[in-house]
Each structure stands twice: as C-alpha cells, then as structure tokens.
Image: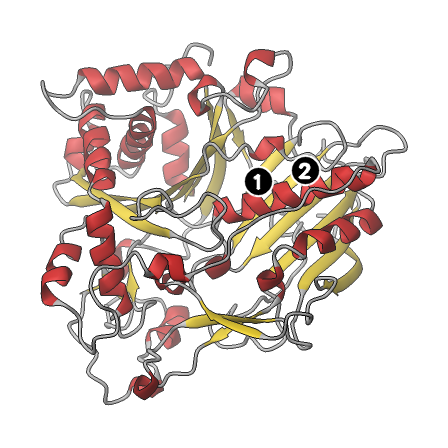
Amino acid sequence: MSSTTPSLELISRTRILPEDHTGSGTRTVPLSILDNTVVNYAMTSAAWYYDKPAEGSQAFSSELLSKSLQKTINAYPQWAGQLQWIPYDLSRGQRHGRVCILYGSPADPGVEFIVTRFPTTLASLIPDNDTRIKNGVWCADDFPAAQLLYPTELALYNTKEYAGRPSVSVQLTAFACGGFGVALRIVHPIADATAMHQFVKDWSAINSALLNNHPPPTPAPIFDPSLVDKAAAGDLTKPAIDPEILRTARTLPLVRYDWWKFAPGCPAPMLPSTAIPQELAGTDLGPSETPAPWDTWDIFAPVSHCLLYFTPVEVQRLWEDASAQLPAGAPRVSRLDALFAHLWRLVVRARGQVADSAPNNLVVTLGVRGRLSPPLPDAFLGSPITLAAASLPGAALAGPSSLGAGAAAIRAALTAFTPEKLAAFLHELAYAVNPQRVWRAFLGERHSVVTSWLGLDLYGIDFGGGAPPRYVEAVMPNMDGVFHIMDARATSGDGSVQAGNRRWFDGPVCVSLHFNAESMRKLLEDSELRKYNDVY
C-alpha cells in the first residue's frame, strides 16, 4: 500500500475474563500430541466484514459484543488462560517442546478485546460479493489486510515469551460507511479452523439473543486434549519408542524436513531459530531428517494475493474430466481432489516446470477429528490436524490429460491416513525429541500448501445484523505457495443455495492464492485456468 493509506485508530484495548474464572480453582492441562506440533504455525485467524446494518441496529455495539463475548468465554475458560511451556524434565516424563494451558488463576491473561476505527468505506476496499463472483477473480494486493489488524503479540508469538500474554485476540473495527469488521486471532495450539468457527458461531448466537432480549444459548465445547493422546498406538509410558509402530508411522505420505539441520541457502533471519536448544545440549537427538530445501524458496521475492471463484458447473466438469482420465478400476476421486489437482497443475505450469522430472509436492492440511479411533466429537477444541503430501514430477502434472493423475495422487495421500496409521503417527510424535523440530511442509518452487475450510459456513455468521458478511477473509501468511479454499457466499437472488444447508459444490467456491508475483501473472493468463468455465 502507498504512504497515503489511512491508518487504523485504536479506541480501546481491554482483557475479558469469564464471569467466575477463579470459582473452580486453578487447573493445568497439557495440550495434545498434535497441538504440540503446531506451536510454530501461523495463528488461526479470520475476519468478517459487514456492510452497515439497519438504521438503529446495535448488533455491533462494542458494549454488547463485549458482554456477549464474556458470556461465550464462560464456556471457553481455557482460552482465557495462560498458554505456556511445560518445564523440560525427563526425570518426570516431561519432554522438550510441550505446552499446557493454566486457567482459573487470578493471573489469567484473559481474551484480548480491541476496538478500532478505520477512516474509509468497505466499498472502497472490497468489491461487493456479486461483482467478485461474476468477475471470477479479485486481485487483493491492494486490500490492506495487515493494516486492518491492530498489532498484538499473543502467547509464544516468538516461541519464548508467554507470561501475561493472551492466546486469543478479538478485534472490532468500525468503518466510515457504518460497516464493521470482526477479526479473530488465536494461537494455533488451542484452535484449528473448526474450533475457531465453533467459537465465533457460539459468540454470534449469544450476541443475537442478547440483542433481541432472548435467553442466550449455552455453548457446549469439549476441551479434553487427552482424547487425542488416547488414540495413540502402544504404551506411551514406556521409556522408548516401539520400533514396529514407528515403521508403520513412517509409511505415511509426508515431507519431513529437519529444522535443526543446517541447509545451504537458509535465510539469515531464520538462522537463530534453527539452533538446537541449549537445554538439549549433549542429548541424543535421534536420527535427523532431510535438511530444508532453502535453495528452492526465495522468501524475499514479491508475493501476490488473488481470489479465484469457481462455479458449481466448473467444479462438476473438473471432476468429470479427472474421473474420465483414471484407469479402469482406479479408486474414485472427489470433487475436491479434482479442484486441488487443477490448482496444482496450474501452479506447476506457472512456475515453468512442465518438463520437470523432480518431485513437486502439494501439502494438504488434514483434519483428523473423524479419522481417529475412536473419533473425536465435533465440538472438540484444539488443533487435531496434520499434513499429508502428494508428490509427482512437474512433467506428470502439466500435460493436457494430467488432471486425473494429480487427483489420484491427492486421493492416495489422503486415504493413507487410516485410524491405524494415525495411531502409529501419534506414537511417533509422542516420543519426538521436540515436536516442532520436523517441518511437514515447505513453500517455494517445489511446494504448495493448501487448506480447506469448506463446509464451515463462515458466511452464515450473523451477530444480529440480519445480513451475511460482505466478505470473509481467511487470514493466511502472504507467502509463496499458500492456498486456501472455502465456500463463497452465494450471489444475490440465488436462494436455492443461500440457505447454508447445501453441499459445498452446489454453490460458488473461493480459492485464495498467495503466490510468487510473476508466477501469479502467468497463472492468471493461462488459458487452462478457465478451461471448464460456463461463465467467465
């Protein structure tokens, strides 16, 4: 953005605690095996932007939102607590790099509640929904995403500092047009996108009830990280890992890069964090993994951000074409597999890898609530996610009949994560010297990471204003190769798919691409992008 960009004005900044946060005493709860792996991840974050509500509506009153937020936190007291490291002490079974939540203490940091004002209109920042979808693309490089979020440093933001720092930040922004923004930022170990959506859905329902003088609903989230650990194979109390279980875990399709292993080309800003922690000096660190391929990722190259919109007909045609390219008897692929494969193929072509024989990796964020045995309840809080990797040479992805091969590779990677293999993987992670040491993703020329929030109905969040958001932003790092997919809001008048109970492919789909700027230009100009279109 230029130097003339309006600046965000801070109105207030407070902390909100449950109404009786010390009534049940102080509790310390270790987070799960999977929660520990995401300590260094970017925050789980989204922002909802609403046009001006009806005249006189108090749906976005900071006083009402603060009150309803507190009533919501009553059911989420852990999120008002202190995220912190568990002291490293192997004699007490406390391994390195594990975290816990301490809550119910007078010293709880609470949930941060920020109120701001931005002196411009939403219409000047964000095209309306119908325009975005009818155009099929919105290049959002000029959208001031970072400037609209007031700076905050949550617990373990730098992996070290946590005392007194909250784990959740909520921001209300008033715009010059009378519209509002509601943004959430949550440290990843306590919430993935599913947990964040559950929280904001509960909060908006309580706010709506208070607005209309109705009894507020009582949320019922489930905070029990031990449910994940109980799904691990073997006996986790034994001093050493089970080699047979480890062999099973190592069959999963993952990329594994050792953050502590020196690799040529590592950018100077990253070097301090790649040092082996002093507490582990002299410790047997076990076998190392592949060093990170820093020579394939220029972290300083310009990155562009664009949103692509796909119609139901496009998705259907993509799926039919991918399915037709599969050999007889091959496993079926899903519509999402086909859409992922289409993006993967476009990315390879834009990066100029059409004749490349080296592996190209598409890393897919995989939720495991329903994959563990026993499965986790839908209302489970935490980050029960991992990363699956599909890998093919660029030459196998870029050809005119390669969509099926890409979709099949993605389907094979995802179906490999069976309850048995996930149990073995949890066993492996439980014995890791440090669960943040191994990167199971990377970015740059040979890696892309895709996350799906399909089915969460983020456009169905209503704080009482009565209208869906103008725009929901999935806040992702602006780095080369970060992709995100979510349901788009239906266009006006499309009542058949506006109700929120549709299948994701019955309405428009939004794909957010953070991509090398030059590669993005090539991707948008590629005739294959809209090969299956019926509108654009």
- Residue 508: image x %, image y %? 49, 21
In three-dimensional space, the C-alpha distance between marks 2 and 1, rounded to whole angstroms, equals: 8 Å
Extreme-right residue of the structure: 56
- Residue 35: image x %, image y %? 41, 61
Q: Secondary structure at mark 1?
A: strand
- Res. 299 image quadrant: bottom left
Extreme-front residue of the structure: 24
User: Which residue lies under the disc numbered 1?
Assistant: 473
One can see residue 292 in this view: no
Where residue 49 is drawn, which disc sits there?
A: 2
- Determine whether, in the image, residue 141 is placed left or right of residue 348: right
Disc on the earlier residue, 2 or 1: 2
- Residue 386: image x %, image y %? 33, 51
- Determine whether, in the image, residue 18 is placed left or right of residue 441: right
One can see residue 430 in this view: yes
Identify which amino acid the numbered label 2 is placed on. Answer: Tyr
Q: Secondary structure at mark 2?
A: strand
